Amino acid sequence: MGISDLRADESAPFANAASEETAARGVMPAIFAAAIVVSAALLFLVQPMFTKLVLPRFGGAPSVWSVAIVFFQCTLLAGYAYSHWLMRAAPSRIAVAIHVLLTIAACFWLPLAIAERWAQPPAGGEAIALFALFAASLGPPFVALAAGGPLLQAWFARTDHPAAANPYFLYALSNAGSFLALVSYPTVIEPFVRLSDQARYWSVAFYALIGLIAACGLVLWRAQARSPIALDDTAAPPAWRDAARWAALAAVPSGLLVAVTAHISTDVAAVPLLWVVPLALYLLSFIIVFARRQVIPHRLVVAVQPFFVICLAAVIVFEPVKTILWLVAAHAAVFFVCALMCHGEVARTRPSGRFLTGFYLSVAAGGALGGLAAGVIAPHVFSWVAEYPLLLALAVLCRPAVAMPGRQYALVAALAAAGSLLIVSGFFPALLDETMFNRAAAALLVACVPLSLVPPACAAVIASVLLANHGLFQPPGSVSVRSFFGVAKVVESPDHRFRILQHGTTMHGAQRIDVDGARQPPERPEPLLYYWDGSAIAQTFNAAQAQSAAPLRYAVIGLGTGSLACRARAHEHVDFYEIDPAIVRIARDPALFTFLSACGADARIMLGDARRMLAQASDAAYDLIVVDAFSSDAIPVHLLTREAMAIYLQKLRPHGTIVMHISNRHLELASVVAGIAAANGLVTLVSDRPDPDETANPYKFSGTVAAVARNREDFAELVQSGDWEFTPPDPAQWVWTDDYCNILGAVLRQLRE
């Protein structure tokens, strides 16, 4: 054996060790990336999944998702605070052991289910009860998942891998995993997997994640045994002003996320498909700004952001767009640009990896504050959704200023013009009719284009125009009440002959208050809107009364103004099911509406979710069940499912009728009702007549109404009227159930019609 062979043999162990170390470093990013992606995916899959599980218990209200977002943001903050404390208070190896044990302990909350103690919401304080329900049902697993992202990134930053000096690419990867999980939920998971199975599969993935986290901890142990921590110890720590700025920049898009989602859900439906769109865009903005290569240059976003907001303000004021898809696209696009701008400023000023957990803590704190302000505080402070225009203005204010000569003069001029518009519209509305306001608003919004170089001035003008737009169309003497279930507003018609109840953007009741020139409602008020004597709903009452010699007993899901109490004959009894205490107070106030006091003195009002309350009623209790519980144009999906129809059928007497008011500007629902009816062995008639002449019949509409019964013979009176058609189920459509609905399909069908 030669000397060269001896040297080769002696160096072999060192070569093997070097190759093993190289291989370990090569696998290291993959292990951390897998753990981070799985953790992020589980974190954002559970949000729509569990909220959908809870939604029916709170009446399908859009605010359920708003409060859920706030809970998730606050819990995310708790997870980030825990990870920040753990990395500062414990050595890396101890931190690994503590976090693995915490994640294992969270398994005691699996599989996910609603905590029975909080299963029944109270009549009042719904937001607090919902927050407690989420905390008791999935708080520990969510905290463990929330802490996993920053902890895994901090662990990777303490390894000896060459990429450890800048671990923020893992943050973009984390948001990419969250984004893909969110997009896949309404498109791949929700339509094909039952909720109970979703919870079980999610739990299995959580168990697998524990193994990935332990593997990452083992990699960290071995890496630190080879070399010291790979962090930049020379970097200066962030000042408190930096942390405050990160929190402020994170708070605005977080608040906008809540406001935009509530706005979209209120006009369509509270379903995961519409929840996911803004949240996915929110995550996408993080992916873009924290990516190694900027797909969208930050300078471009800063430059165009105010123009997007100005255009949205014009859409809100002048309403040139009516189609729901284009409206959703407009609001979502502006939200995305604002989130991209604010998060871009956060990413541009991020610190070194040494201060990673503290940085994430500041961002999470801002997100929680923004969510709390928009989702919890604002509904108690404002009687309308004022937080949305204010947050749009704040998003412009977050834009970095550009040096401009005479900016002080521009700011003063803008503030003066904006203040004047607010004062005139708020205190002297008679001086500023709709035409004059539109001209003033158009001039101010055009002036916003050059003012975009002065963020305070541009923000002030946008806020004033949007706030004045609301003030102008809020007549003196109107009543506006905001609750967990939305904004209810009582206004008078321009000619002061009618009083109208609006919920969101839709009229839910009206009463004539000026008869023959006297401002005195009649002793027995005439039902209006969709309930007048010639309406489809009135026809169903006439048919039921003609078919039964005995007095009817009927149920109405959705109180409104109580108009349907005046459809009862002598000795007939009505039970109203209403979830919103504010609506009950309005309907019972004779100074506002007199339907209940004049016609329904003995009517019962059951406060709570109608489906749950109706399920507790006696079987075969009603001759007629009217379902008219839509809030604004949104639909409570849990009242339009096969299981809901089974409950209605159980409470219906022989030869009785189920009437569903399905008028909607954005959704085609007649085929949905036909499907859930056929699934229960029932037949469906639909009336969709044109509205009568508005001049001769003010505040009288026909609407779209579906009548459901056990057989065709029960429809004899309705068929003779000629206004109704039998509607068979569409074999190409899946039946809506508690585990499945297709909102997008309903939107597309309405657009085709």
Image: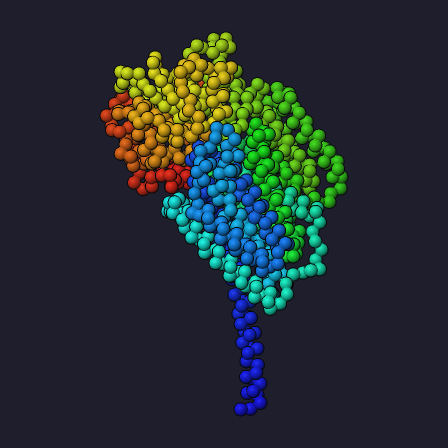
Residue at the left extreme?
713
Residue at image coords 36%, 36%: 641
Task: Tell me which corner region of the image, top left, top right, bottom left or bottom right, holds residue 399.
Answer: top right
Q: Which of 452 and 464 is in front in this view?
A: 464
Q: Position of residue 459 (x, y in %)?
A: 65, 37
Q: Where is residue 289 in the image (x, y as percent from the top left)?
A: 59, 51
In the rendered image, the vertical position of residue 8 relative to residue 95, given as above or below: below
Q: Nearer the viewer, residue 284 or 424?
A: 284
Residue at the bottom extreme?
1
Give the quadrant of the C terminus: top left
Residue 67 in view in this figure: yes
Number of labelled discs?
A: 0
Residue at image coords 75%, 37%: 408
Residue at image coords 72%, 36%: 410
Residue at image coords 36%, 29%: 616
Task: Tell me which corner region of the image, top left, top right, bottom left or bottom right, holds residue 526.
Answer: top left
Q: Position of residue 417 (x, y in %)?
A: 69, 30
Left or right side of 158 for 274:
left
Residue 726 in view in this figure: no
Left or right side of 389 for 402:
right
Task: Tell me which corner region of the image, top left, top right, bottom left or bottom right, holds residue 112.
Answer: top left
